[in-house]
Amino acid sequence: MPESPATPALHRLLVVEDDPGIRMLLESALRLSGYDVASAGTGQDALRDVESLRPELVLLDVMLPDLDGFEVTRSLRAAGDRTPVLFLTARGEVADRIAGLTAGGDDYVTKPFSIEEVLLRIRAILRRTDFDHASGAEGISSGILRFADLELDENAHEVHRAGEYIPLSPTEFNLLTYMMENANHVLSKTKILNHVWGYDFAGDGRIVETYIKYLRRKVDCFEPPLLHTIRGVGYCLRLPRDQQSAGADR
């Protein structure tokens, strides 16, 4: 009897939410959408499950009874774990969003949220991480991008500037890759959202602003500055034309 074709592996997700009702809702919706789902109710359980289950994405509530979601993410990143994190947060203020992204998160959904929005964000994150894996497997060219003294290794998923290693989250890495691939070209927020986040709708451009600011803190702590904001147009990776450029903000 011929063997049946292998069933494609499901994406494994970890839902971390202390509210049993929300947790069960997310588990059910994600399973119905074809994902392999595990869940946890505390930050400590989340850290344990990420290590043991190796999920491809973590949906992480910010307000947990022990460690908050930001602490969990910082612990993962400090341990070298790059698992993408999608925050579930009741905090919609800009300062809280920045705190989550600077902790190493990849995106956020503000409560109350729709399941459709959560699924859209998950698909966008998984699309870009799947692309990274495929690119590494195919060994496209040398996998090295260089601009000035900035070097990005797509296969090793590492960035160096002036010879110094710069740790980046997966989304920061993808954003910098896109900018290096389009060095000296101005990229609008819409183009960046479509390419890096993969949104199929007009996403919130503020997330691009936040990531550019955070990426700038890491990459442009060296001289000369390379990441420039072009007023009313977008962002550009280039060498400064002069120190008093009228077309760019720092």
Image: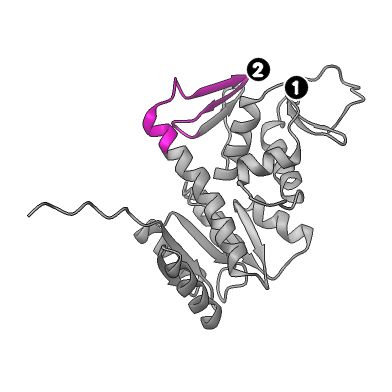
Task: Give SS at disc 2.
Answer: loop
Query: What mark, if any, has residue 22 been given in the picture?
Result: none
Q: Is residue 184 above or below residue 165?
A: above
Q: Secondary structure at mark 1?
A: loop
| Residues shaded magenta | 134-157
Q: Which residue is mark 1?
A: 224
Horizontal side, residue 5 vs residue 226: left or right: left
> Does residue 171 appear in this view?
yes
Task: Identify the image quadrant of residue 191.
Answer: top right
Q: Is residue 216 magenta?
A: no
Q: CA gap, disc 2 to disc 1?
A: 9 Å
User: Mark 2 — residue?
Assistant: 148
Residue at x 75% of width, y 65% of height: 92
Q: Amino acid at mark 1?
A: Pro
Instruction: Say if the magenta span includes residue 143.
Output: yes
On the picture, is 90 further left or further right than 135? right
Q: Are marks 2 and 1 in contact (CB under 8 Å)?
A: yes
Say whether disc 2 or disc 1 marks the residue closer to the N-terminus.
2
User: Label 2 is placed on what type of residue?
Assistant: Ala
Residue 169 in sight: no
Quarter of the image with the C terminus in it: top right
Q: Furthest residue to the bottom?
A: 21
Position in image of residue 141 (x %, y %) = 44, 20
